[in-house]
Amino acid sequence: MNFGLTTARRTAALGICVAAFLSAPSGTHPAGAAVAAARLHISVTPDGGGGAYAMRLMCDPDKGGHPRPAAVCDALRAVDGHIERLDVNPGACPMVYQPVQVKVRGVWHGRPVAYHQEFSNSCAMDRALSPLV
């Protein structure tokens, strides 16, 4: 099924979203507004671009465009924001090669976060990074 978007268009759209998120002003907040101690942009791009998605996550307080911010923030707090240390659900996955890339950019309690990993398939990604992705 062709939805009319090429890989290049999807990649460009994802890049625009990331740029908009990272360039948003963060130094001014309304009086009384809680400032998140962690701000992350998560993008998942399957090989070929079909089914790519991106979301924003904030922790402390837990919120953002992620469907499960509290669960993700709890998992990240357990590893002090070190995404590479997540190993939520280790186990076997089918040996099907359908690569998927995960990128996470942002700040975790004042420390820059720059995570990029390619997984052999979405099962391997979910095993390593769920509930983040």
Image: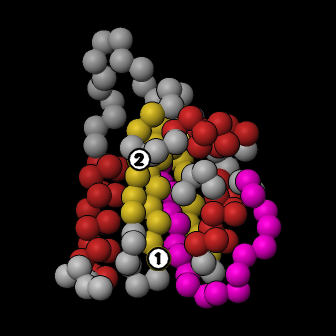
Left or right placement of residue 90 versus residue 74 in this view: right
Q: Quadrant of residue 6?
A: bottom left
Foreground pick, 110 / 130:
130
Secondary element type, mark 2: strand
Q: Residue at x 60, y 39 (%)?
A: 71
**Image disc number at residue 96:** none
Left or right of 133? Residue 53 is left
Q: Residue furthest left?
A: 4
What residue is disc 2 on? 56
Q: Does 94 sit above or below residue 13?
A: below
Instruction: Name the quarter where the C terminus is drawn.
Output: bottom right
Q: Which residues make up the magenta segment?
A: 88-106
Q: Which mark is residue 46?
A: 1
Three-letter residue code for mark 1: Pro
Q: Quadrant location of the N terminus?
A: bottom left
Helix or strand or loop: what does disc 1 sit on?
A: strand
Between 54 and 127, the one nearer to me in the picture: 127
Question: Does residue 43 appear in this view?
Answer: yes
Q: Position of residue 47 (x, y in %)?
A: 46, 82
Which secondary structure class fits the magenta region best?
A: loop
Q: Residues within 10 Å of mark 1 (few under 14, many from 20)?
A: some
Q: How many marks?
A: 2
Instruction: Residue 73: give x, y in percent of width and height.
Output: 59, 38
